[in-house]
Amino acid sequence: MLPCLSGRLRYRLRTQSARVDGFVGSRRLHYTIERDSGGRWMLNGEPQHDVTGLIDVDLGFTPASNLLAIRRFDLGIGATTPAPAAYLTFPRLELVRLEQTYRRLDETRYAYAAPLFGYDEILGVSPHGFVVDYPGLWTSVTASG
């Protein structure tokens, strides 16, 4: 849910950690996000108290974040779950609590809602759970060659 700016980001995302390097506009970014065994999140070594106890981290610029929750919950068709996450905000970079829910509609679709952003759409997913269609935000494109 980033504003449209030019840039280049490289990231590594895991359930309880992430690293982001690159630039957006003229702003250089280097962020390390980690969750310790006590459930406390750190952003570049600084405690992020509002997200203590959350399991997943969410980087708003990539649907790879959704993959973590989709695979971890492994919902049956028709099942719904809340999935709050530690969300990296932009342009003020901090971790905030992102309330979100997933409801599995069938093998390749999830109803997804993130009220903080007024987002409530149907996500298309691959058989492995990777989001391939994030309406209004992101669509996977297969390279031909």
Image (cartoon, rainbow, N blue to C red):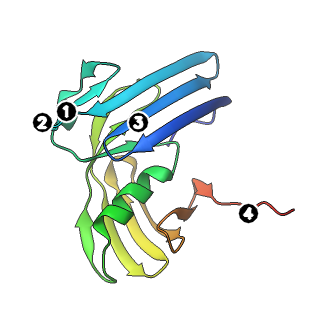
Structural crowding at the residue carrying mark 3, measured as other residues with C-alpha within 10 Å and reported as few (<14), some (14–19) or many (≥20) = some
Q: Is residue 22 left or right of residue 81?
A: right
Of labels 1 and 3, the one closer to you: 3
**Percent position of residue 57, x then y:** 34, 43
The local secondary structure at tag 2 comes to loop
For marks 1 and 3, give the CA distance. 17 Å
Q: Nearer the viewer, residue 129 or 80?
A: 129
User: Closer to the N terminus: mark 1 or mark 3?
Assistant: 3
Q: Amino acid at mark 3?
A: Ala
**Percent position of residue 116, x then y:** 33, 47
Label at residue 50: 1
Q: Residue at x 34, y 58 (%)?
A: 69
For marks 2 and 3, give the CA distance. 17 Å
Label at residue 18: 3
Label at residue 142: 4
Location of residue 21 (image quadrant): top right
Q: Is residue 73 left or right of residue 109?
A: left
**Percent position of residue 132, x then y:** 58, 64
Asked if disc 4 and disc 3 are in contact, CB closer than 8 Å, the reply is no
For marks 4 and 3, give the CA distance. 26 Å
For marks 1 and 2, give the CA distance. 14 Å
Q: Nearer the viewer, residue 114 or 110?
A: 110
Check disc 2 and report the residue beneath it. 38
User: Closer to the N terminus: mark 1 or mark 2?
Assistant: 2
Structural crowding at the residue carrying mark 2, measured as other residues with C-alpha within 10 Å and reported as few (<14), some (14–19) or many (≥20) = few
Location of residue 26 (image quadrant): top right
Structural crowding at the residue carrying mark 4, measured as other residues with C-alpha within 10 Å and reported as few (<14), some (14–19) or many (≥20) = few
